[in-house]
Amino acid sequence: MRRLVALMMRLMGRRTCEDVVSVLQDYFEGRLDPKLAAIIERHFQGCPDCTAFARTYHEVIKLSGAMSCDEIPAEVHDRVRKAIRERSAEAR
Ligand SMILES: [Zn+2]
């Protein structure tokens, strides 16, 4: 919970793609604070990269079926986050 509050502060201060990606799992599981979810959604509106990623992420969750999101290997998370970071760096 403390982690979530810290994240929220960061997200409100500067909404980076990396931060958005890091809470996507909670977002799709409906575990996100509504205020934070609203911030994420606002970010989506201005960020095609995150919108595309969120869509893919959601598909992966659906396809994985019974598999819990917690079981998505950390390595996959890291790889995807890195890809997003690189792409958003290119866009600048
Ligand atoms: Zn973004």
Image (tube, rainbow, N blue to C red):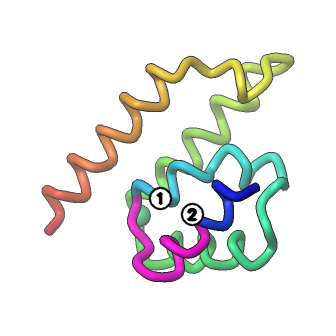
Say whether residue 16 is left or right of residue 91.
Answer: right
The C terminus appears in which quarter of the rendering?
A: bottom left
**Image coords of residue 76 (percent x, y):** 47, 23
Looking at the picture, does residue 30 appear above or below residue 43? above
> Which residue is denoted by mark 1 in the rendering?
19
Mark 2 burial class by Cα count in 10 Å: few <14, some 14-19, many 20+: some
Instruction: Describe the element under mark 1 as helix, strand or loop.
Output: helix
Residue type at numbered disc 1 = Asp
Give the spatial CA distance, label 2 vs label 1. Answer: 7 Å
Say whether residue 80 is left or right of residue 60.
Answer: left
Say whether residue 43 is left or right of residue 36.
Answer: left
Residue type at numbered disc 2 = Leu
Mark 1 burial class by Cα count in 10 Å: few <14, some 14-19, many 20+: some
Residue at 40% of width from left, 78% of height from top? 14
The N terminus appears in which quarter of the rendering?
A: bottom right
Observer-nearest residue: 60 or 8? 8
Residue at 71% of width from left, 31% of height from top? 61
Distance from mark 1 CB to nearest ligand 1 atom below 8 Å: no
Distance from mark 2 CB to nearest ligand 1 atom below 8 Å: no
Q: Are marks 2 and 1 in contact (CB under 8 Å)?
A: yes
Residue 32 figure quarter? bottom right
Q: Which mark is residue 31?
A: none
**Image coords of residue 28 (percent x, y):** 75, 49
Is most of the magenta stretch helix, strand or loop?
helix
**Image coords of residue 52 (percent x, y):** 47, 52
> Which residue is denoted by mark 2 in the rendering?
7
Numbered range of the magenta stretch: 7-17
Q: Earlier in the sequence, mark 2 or mark 1?
A: 2
Instruction: Describe the element under mark 2 as helix, strand or loop.
Output: helix
**Image coords of residue 40 (percent x, y):** 60, 70
Say whether residue 31 is left or right of residue 61.
Answer: right
